[in-house]
Image (tube, grey):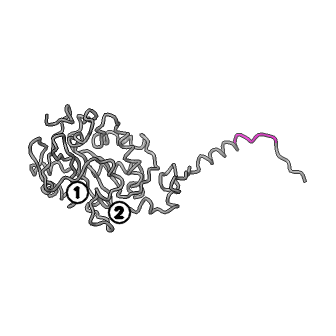
Amino acid sequence: MKMCCSLLPPSPLVIVSTALLLLMQPVVMATAGGGWEDAQHGCQGSELQGKELFCSWECLVFTLQWPGGFCQSLNNESQCRIPVSVNGWTIHGLWPQTRTSCRCWPLFHSDVQELEEELSEQWPSLLKSKTSFTFWKEEWKKHGSTAACVEGMNSPLRYFQICLKLRAQMEFQRLLEDAGITPSCDQPYQVEDVQKVLAPLVGQHPEIQCIKDEQDRQVWFQVKIPLSRNLTTGCVPHAEAGRRFSERSGLDSSSSPGHPCPRDQPFYFVPINHQRPCRPCG
């Protein structure tokens, strides 16, 4: 019996239906490590290889930076800028403490468009060479996409909303002022005194980070606040309970030039100077 094949081209309806079916299928890509990435939903496809790859972390670090200190950390001081609207602590990032990152969920401008005004004030780029959106995009790719395995942070919008809420809760500038800890070019401070003041908001174990300025002085740069997955303060991973976050962090170490301020040395809390960001004290 002969098999016959129609020589007529497929109808437009068939072509369109087939195209729609293809578009509805998730795009799945093999990674270098043998896992799988779902291009539409970030790392969710990696669950086939074991969710523990990206979600075994217990703690996050919420990091706030002081613009006056940040500018002191740059090798090229001409690169620093502090927007005139910025007069306090700004967000550096929210980092799951794990050595395995997802990096597989892209961020688009539309994802954060409704938060852009607030993010620009609370999470600005302080580098002339980097736009604020580029800064957010890098932080999301490196850290946010890994945090997305937690329900409350399982999209770019939710992740950045959480960061802004944490920033509002960690408004400790008034606490510092009430304790007499204010920006100054001449007044040194001690780590222990600052930790006591911040404890009601950030818990007992924040890491006060410094950099060295051109005068070889310790200058306050940022604060790293350990949080549990439910965003409460004071998280310490069971397996590494005795180690500092800066030592066990696999994701944030390369992006932070700071170091723990020495407990046996004073440090300086330099003011913000919008006109001369890298030379606030002249």
Q: Nearer the viewer, residue 6 or 271?
A: 271
Query: Where's the N terminus, which quadrant?
Result: bottom right
User: Number of numbered discs present?
Assistant: 2
- Mark 1 in CB contact with mark 2 (< 8 angstroms): no
- Please state the horizontal and vertical placement of residue 71, each as a whole percent of the image: 23, 39
8 is within the stretch colored magenta: yes
What kind of residue is marked 1? Pro
**Furthest residue toward right:** 1
Q: Nearer the viewer, residue 177 or 247?
A: 247
The kind of secondary structure element at disc 2 is loop
As drawn, is 152 to the left or to the right of 17? left
Q: Residue at x 47, y 54 (%)?
A: 43
- Please state the horizontal and vertical placement of residue 166, each as a whole percent of the image: 28, 52
Q: Residue at x 50, y 57 (%)?
A: 46
Q: Earlier in the sequence, mark 1 or mark 2?
A: 2
Residue 204, placed above or below residue 111:
below
The kind of secondary structure element at disc 1 is loop
Q: Which residues are magenta?
A: 7-13
Q: Main secondary structure of the magenta part?
A: loop
What kind of residue is marked 2? Glu
- Please state the horizontal and vertical placement of residue 112, each as a whole percent of the image: 39, 43
As drawn, is 33 to the left or to the right of 171? right
2 is within the stretch colored magenta: no
- Please state the horizontal and vertical placement of residue 265, each as a whole percent of the image: 13, 53
**How dense is the environment of label 1, judged by Cα within 10 Å: few (below 14), some, or many (20 and up)?**
many
State the mark number for residue 58. Answer: 2
As drawn, is 175 to the left or to the right of 42? left
Report the Cα–Cα distance between label 1 and label 2: 17 Å
Residue 65, placed above or below residue 242:
above
Q: Which residue is mark 1?
A: 206
